[in-house]
Image (cartoon, rainbow, N blue to C red):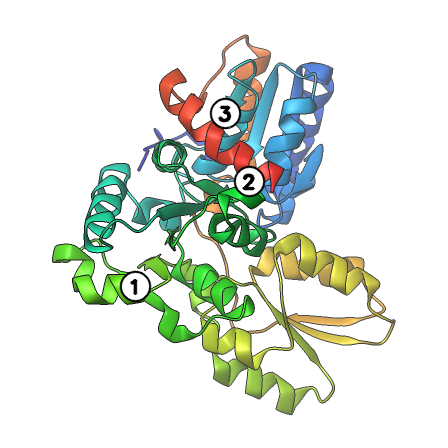
């Protein structure tokens, strides 16, 4: 976890309208020197100033193509790391609030992952174990994955990457007997089942207990070893919420993110990544009704941009990423003000050796 010194009261007490006016002015002053990236889960007041919007990987890839020297990433820490990796350290990647971390990424520590890989390989008795790491992870964990012959994945291409891992080396795959998937157990489980495997083919590795809480026999029987981790936003969606919204809105289409628990994905009509959700709703006919199981800021914007459709968050209460919300207009303005004064603050950099290994895992994902 990273900490952020408190901002001066001149920022924290500034009226929202004034902050917006000053952000717009600073953007104009800086011109092509700065590119602001806005993740889908960001609040509207910050998202409105993004030059590029999207999910974490899309933004990181687009960051590598921008000519701007300064990339202000309105997301969370692992996303800024990914942008630094993909830009090769040639840009200043700035996170306006260093306290904007990711609970899921923090669940997996690089040393614990290396220990888990050694434990699983030993218990597997010589079987080929390939790690597949969700992009929602630290650069250090991505680097462990790259060194171990594994790859990263996104929620949109997890199945393709899992299939690559299990394919024979002669067919261009990793030749894995087992996939060690981290840090989100739900994405991994949902992907395995979508590929035709059973829940019995999955076993959960808990880094907090001895030997991951698994016997050698349990490791040998499993095709998929899943790190005990999850996204607290998507964890909150339940089967009862799906049933409730169906009673309230007959004919509704329920679409959820694959980070949701397996039983919720089964109960829903569709599951897909943030970009897949956006495309599905955009292609839907006017008058259609949707209940979406993902972060509220994205769903509310989706509703506003599709006034001809009825769109709501699956839950009756907001599903908010509180760490993403730590990047607010005050912190964005502060970062831009410092840039205008010639000072780069909160630059996120990945050490060259870690970046090199992490890039291996990321590039395997991009090629899949």
Q: Residue at x 67, y 52 (%)?
A: 275
Q: Position of residue 108 (x, y in %)?
A: 31, 46
Mark 2 vs mark 3: in front: 2
Quadrant for the N terminus, please.
Answer: top left
Residue under pointer 3: 85
Quadrant for the C terminus, please.
Answer: top right
Q: For the residue carrying disc 2, how many other residues have a C-alpha within 10 Å: few (<14), some (14-19), or many (20+)?
A: many
Residue under pointer 2: 365
Q: Residue at x 45, y 20 (%)?
A: 347
Q: Is residue 110 left or right of residue 201?
A: left
Q: Residue at x 32, y 65 (%)?
A: 222
Q: Is residue 176 above or below residue 272?
A: above
Mark 3 vs mark 1: in front: 1
Q: Earlier in the sequence, mark 3 or mark 1?
A: 3
Residue under pointer 1: 204
Q: Is residue 290 above or below residue 130?
A: below
Q: Earlier in the sequence, mark 2 or mark 3?
A: 3
Q: Earlier in the sequence, mark 1 or mark 2?
A: 1
């Amino acid at each position: 976890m990273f900490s952020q010194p408190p901002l001066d009261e001149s920022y924290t007490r500034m009226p929202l309208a004034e902050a917006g006016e000053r952000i717009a002015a600073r953007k104009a002053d800086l011109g092509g020197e700065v590119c602001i990236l806005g993740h889908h889960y960001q609040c509207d007041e910050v998202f409105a100033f993004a030059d590029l919007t999207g999910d974490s990987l899309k933004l990181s890839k687009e960051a590598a193509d921008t000519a701007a020297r300064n990339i202000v990433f309105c997301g969370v820490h692992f996303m800024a790391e990914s942008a630094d990796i993909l830009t090769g350290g040639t840009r200043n990647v700035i996170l306006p609030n260093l306290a904007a971390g990711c609970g899921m990424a923090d669940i997996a520590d690089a040393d614990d992952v290396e220990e888990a890989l050694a434990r699983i390989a030993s218990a597997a008795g010589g079987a080929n174990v390939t790690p597949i790491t969700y992009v929602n992870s630290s650069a250090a964990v991505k680097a462990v994955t790259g060194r171990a012959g594994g790859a990263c994945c996104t929620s949109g291409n997890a199945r393709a990457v899992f299939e690559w891992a299990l394919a024979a080396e002669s067919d261009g795959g990793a030749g894995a007997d087992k996939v060690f998937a981290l840090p989100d157990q739900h994405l991994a489980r949902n992907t395995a089942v979508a590929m035709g495997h059973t829940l019995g083919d999955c076993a959960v590795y808990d880094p907090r207990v001895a030997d991951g809480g698994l016997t050698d026999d349990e490791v040998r029987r499993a095709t998929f070893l899943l790190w005990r981790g999850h996204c607290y936003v998507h964890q909150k969606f339940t089967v009862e919420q799906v049933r409730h919204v169906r009673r309230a809105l007959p004919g509704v289409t329920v679409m959820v993110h694959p980070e949701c628990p397996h039983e919720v994905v089964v109960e829903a009509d569709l599951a897909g990544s943030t970009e897949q959700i956006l495309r599905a709703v955009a292609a839907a006919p006017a008058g259609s009704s949707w209940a979406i199981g993902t972060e509220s800021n994205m769903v509310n914007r989706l509703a506003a941009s599709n006034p001809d459709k009825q769109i709501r968050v699956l839950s009756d209460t907001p599903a908010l990423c509180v760490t993403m919300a730590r990047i607010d207009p005050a912190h964005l303005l502060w970062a831009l003000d410092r840039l205008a004064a010639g000072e780069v603050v909160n630059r996120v950099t990945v050490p060259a050796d870690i970046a090199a290994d992490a890039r291996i895992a990321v590039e395997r994902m991009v090629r899949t």
